[in-house]
């Protein structure tokens, strides 16, 4: 484990990796299985994905553990393997990163609704996220990222659980779409409310990933979060809005098209820039190269 100093973000912009799901599909992952378990069963392919992102210029790579919480793993009959899956996936990423970058333990949504919308009590949700965060930390990672959340209450619970169980730097990122009100999560949370709530819960870095907000619109979202008190911000947009082509979901932006929005994102004050659905090492390389040119000029 390396010490991740958040103060590093005062003087430089870090590059995060891109999509894991997109790359797993390219590597032959069959739908209907646990991506996390499949990655361990196909370690050579998983390592190759991590290595490609490091080579592309990623300073931070994420573990293949987005859905490795007890609720989602239980659907595959893998709840008893939670500790092993999270720890081993982390160890793989750590061994690939070496001294070339940081490893962030990836925590995604539980897939369940908390009370009163659902049946999961806050204490149950807290315990689930604490269990995953602890297992991730046992693998020797450097920080935690909680991403693609839409419910602010679930996000706040996850942040508190990760902070209390690991003491590591926590990145918290929610997924926003655009509507007549501007930017909102599927649960109706605004960037302002999200930033305030995530910071109050203990997040060190906040931001947005996935959703329908493309790179070129991210400066507006960054401005809202900064106005709400956010000092350090991460953005990881998709490679454009998804389209259905021949029955498959396709994210159409090329690496250069996506990277074209980077100058304004840098100007707006993003501290970490990466990619989500549809992005590849080629996208991250384009983003990394342009970011370096901008920051050196």
Image (cartoon, grey):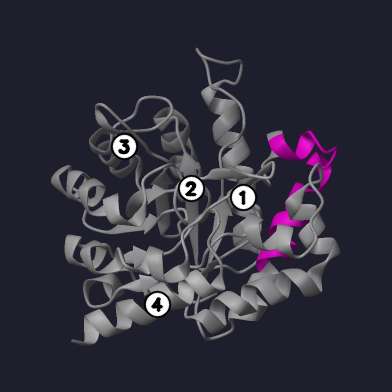
Where residue 50 appears, as percent x and y from the top left, is: 63, 73
Q: Which label is found at residue 166?
A: none
- 92 shown above or below 171: below
Where residue 251 appears, as percent x and y from the top left, is: 53, 53
Q: Give how far apart the Cα atoms at labels 4 and 1 are.
A: 23 Å
For the residues labelled 4 and 1, say whether their Cβ atoms are less than 8 Å apart.
no
Magenta part of the chain: 72-90
Q: Is residue 252 left or right of 173 when viewed as pictured?
A: right
Q: Which residue is mark 3?
A: 194
Q: Earlier in the sequence, mark 2 or mark 3?
A: 2
Camera-nearest label, 4 or 1 = 4
Q: Which residue is mark 4?
A: 288
Q: Which residue is mark 1?
A: 66
User: What SS does tag 4 mark?
Assistant: helix
Q: Give how far apart the Cα atoms at labels 2 and 3 are.
A: 12 Å
Q: Quadrant of residue 263?
A: bottom left
Q: Earlier in the sequence, mark 1 or mark 3?
A: 1
Within the magenta stretch, is there residue 79? yes
Q: Which label is found at residue 147?
A: 2
Q: Is residue 274 left or right of 90 when viewed as pictured?
A: left
Is residue 220 something that shows in the picture? yes
Is residue 60 something that shows in the picture? no
Q: Quadrant of residue 271?
A: bottom left
Q: Residue furthest front?
A: 246
- Neighbor class of circle 1 (other Cα within 10 Å; few <14, some 14-19, many 20+) is many
| Viewport quadrant of the N terminus | bottom right
Q: Give how far apart the Cα atoms at labels 4 and 3 are.
A: 27 Å
Camera-nearest label, 4 or 3 = 4
In depth, the one of 174 and 202 nearer the eye is 174
């Amino acid at each position: 484990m390396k010490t991740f100093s958040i103060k590093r973000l005062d003087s430089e912009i870090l590059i995060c990796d891109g999509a894991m799901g997109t790359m797993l599909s390219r590597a032959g992952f069959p739908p209907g299985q646990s991506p996390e378990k499949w990655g361990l069963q196909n370690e050579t392919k998983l390592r190759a994905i991590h290595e490609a992102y490091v080579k592309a210029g990623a300073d931070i790579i994420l573990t293949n553990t987005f859905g490795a919480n007890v609720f989602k793993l239980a659907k595959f009959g893998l709840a008893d393997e939670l500790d092993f899956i999270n720890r081993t996936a982390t160890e793989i990423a750590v061994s690939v990163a070496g001294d070339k970058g940081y490893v962030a333990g990836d925590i995604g949504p539980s897939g369940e609704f908390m009370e009163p919308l659902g049946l999961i009590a806050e204490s149950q949700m807290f315990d689930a996220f604490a269990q995953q965060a602890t297992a991730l930390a046992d693998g020797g990672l450097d920080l935690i990222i909680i991403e693609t959340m839409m419910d602010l209450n679930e996000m706040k619970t996850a942040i508190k659980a990760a902070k209390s169980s690991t003491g590591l730097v926590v990145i918290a990122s929610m997924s926003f779409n655009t509507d007549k009100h501007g930017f909102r999560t599927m649960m109706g949370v605004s960037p302002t409310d999200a930033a305030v709530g995530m910071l109050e819960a203990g997040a060190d870095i906040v931001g947005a990933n996935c959703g329908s907000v493309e790179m070129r619109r991210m400066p507006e979202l960054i401005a809202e979060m900064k106005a709400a008190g956010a000092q350090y911000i991460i953005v990881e947009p998709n490679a454009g809005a998804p389209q259905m082509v021949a029955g498959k979901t396709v994210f159409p932006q090329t690496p250069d098209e996506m990277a074209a929005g980077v100058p304004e994102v840098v100007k707006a004050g993003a501290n970490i820039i990466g990619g989500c659905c549809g992005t590849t090492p080629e996208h991250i390389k384009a983003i990394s190269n342009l970011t370096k040119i901008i920051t050196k000029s």
